[in-house]
Image (cartoon, rainbow, N blue to C red):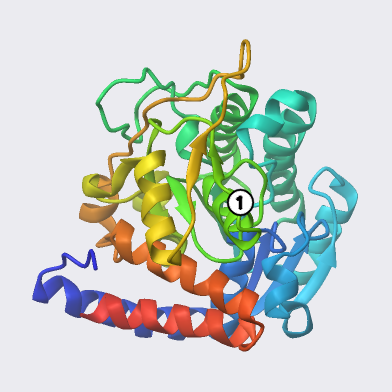
């Protein structure tokens, strides 16, 4: 397990666990995109902390989905809405006046962005502007964390970990949309939400995570869901880019960072309301082939094949890594699980799902509990 905290740092993180419960219990938290993979995990975690979770999202994007599997709908305020529906989004913010907002609603796939670039730009850029405009127009005081992507950086394919102040960019529509969303977030922060403006105080940050793995993801063109679908059907896993290197991390690692960051933003926006990276340690940055082979070993069977190359395939980055020094130093956050532990937890989730023996809501809560126990060690 990749827990590398010193004893002093571990004690500080134990204090953070109690602080999470004390700070979020009874608080109204709006999550956009709560029916998606990451959004559902975050909603489940906040619900377990005693928060009043308001979910605003389209229907679950896949079938099966984690949202359906965990049965979360009956325990939160579950609103169906599009972030491009300005009126409904504003009405939701005005009605519930959330003390915390986590904006995760997005078109999250690189290859889908080639098929429908306009939708990608609309959802990821205009959708982000809509949630920020809803905050501005509703005249509420809140703490807002906007989730973008590690792909928001202008990736030069070099052996260099990208820092929060590196240039934004994007070769493909998805990456470009996330870079543009970052510019929108910064503009709203400086124009409307910084101390000294006439509007009520709003603490606004953006967060950029690496390639996230965990149970409950069935999206197309992602390596872990691709592996699971193939393994369940006893077919070879088809890999497009076996040598592509990515910063893999377990889903609860960045979510823990988001929760800690939001509390610090609320207390001291002048210091913490800015951009943050949440990624793995360098040892977890491995290629797709290595990740796939680790998944097959953990599953206990299976093979993989490289897909035959098509003529002029869509561009996908070959190398990407995040510098997480700022989050380590200023937030006291560090990744808890190494890549092997992340794969074990991920495969365990899917194995339980397909066994049909354990309620996935309870099992997912147990994974959150075990994660926090690992934080303490």
Vertical position of residue 218 compared to residue 149: above or below: below
Give the image location of residue 88, x and y in percent.
Answer: 88, 55
Vertical position of residue 359 compared to residue 183: above or below: below
Question: Which residue appears at 78% of the width and 84% of the height?
Answer: 74
- Left or right of 81? Residue 217 is left
- Left or right of 351? Residue 121 is right
The quarter of the displayed image where residue 21 is located: bottom left
Vertical position of residue 158 compared to residue 366: above or below: above
Q: Residue furthest left?
A: 7
Vertical position of residue 40 compared to residue 219: above or below: below
Question: Which residue appears at 52% of the width and 79% of the height?
Answer: 24
Crowd tier of the residue under label 1, counting other residues whose Cα lies within 10 Å: few below 14, some 14–19, many 20 or above: some
Give the image location of residue 1, x and y in percent.
Answer: 24, 68
Give the image location of residue 291, x and y in percent.
Answer: 38, 48
Classify mark 1: helix, strand or loop: loop
Is residue 370 in sight in this rendering? yes
Question: Which residue appears at 41% of the width and 40% of the height?
Answer: 288
Question: Which residue appears at 76% of the width and 49% of the height?
Answer: 137
The one of 369 and 360 positioned closer to us in this rendering? 360
Question: Circle 1 is placed at which residue position?
Answer: 235
Q: Quadrant of the C terminus?
A: bottom left
Give the image location of residue 78, x and y in percent.
Answer: 80, 72
The one of 150 and 139 positioned closer to us in this rendering? 150
């Amino acid at each position: 397990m990749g827990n590398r905290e010193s004893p002093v740092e571990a004690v500080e993180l134990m204090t953070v666990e109690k602080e999470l419960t004390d700070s979020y219990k009874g608080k109204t938290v709006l999550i956009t995109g709560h029916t998606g993979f990451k959004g559902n995990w975050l909603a489940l975690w906040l619900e377990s902390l005693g928060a009043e979770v308001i979910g605003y999202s389209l229907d679950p994007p896949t079938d099966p989905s984690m949202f359906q599997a965990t049965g979360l709908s009956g325990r939160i305020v579950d609103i169906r809405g599009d972030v491009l529906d300005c009126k409904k989004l504003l009405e939701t913010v005005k009605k519930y006046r959330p003390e915390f907002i986590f904006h995760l609603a997005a078109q999250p796939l690189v290859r889908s962005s080639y098929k429908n670039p306009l939708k990608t730009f609309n959802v990821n850029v205009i959708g982000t502007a809509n949630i920020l405009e809803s905050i501005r127009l509703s005249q509420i005081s809140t703490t807002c964390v906007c989730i973008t992507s590690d792909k928001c950086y202008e990736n030069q394919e070099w052996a260099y970990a990208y820092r929060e102040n590196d240039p934004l960019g994007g070769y493909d529509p998805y990456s470009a949309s996330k870079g543009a969303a970052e510019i929108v977030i910064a503009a709203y922060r400086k124009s409307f939400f910084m101390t000294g403006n006439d509007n009520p105080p709003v603490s606004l940050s953006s967060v950029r995570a690496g390639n996230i793995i965990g149970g409950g993801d069935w999206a197309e063109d992602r390596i872990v869901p691709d592996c699971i679908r193939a393994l369940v059907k006893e077919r070879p896993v088809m890999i497009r880019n076996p040598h592509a290197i990515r910063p893999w991390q377990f889903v609860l690692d960045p979510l823990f960072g988001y929760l800690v960051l939001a509390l610090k933003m609320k207390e001291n926006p002048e210091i913490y309301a800015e951009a943050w990276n949440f990624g793995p340690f360098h040892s977890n940055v491995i290629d797709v082939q290595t990740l796939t082979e680790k998944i097959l070993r953990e599953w206990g069977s299976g093979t993989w094949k490289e897909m035959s190359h098509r003529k002029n395939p869509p561009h996908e980055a070959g190398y990407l890594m995040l510098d997480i020094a700022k989050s380590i130093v200023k937030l006291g956050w560090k990744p808890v699980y190494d890549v092997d532990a992340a794969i074990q937890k991920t495969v365990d989730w899917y194995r339980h799902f397909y066994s049909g023996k354990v309620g996935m809501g309870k099992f997912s809560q147990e994974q959150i509990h075990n994660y926090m126990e690992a934080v303490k060690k």
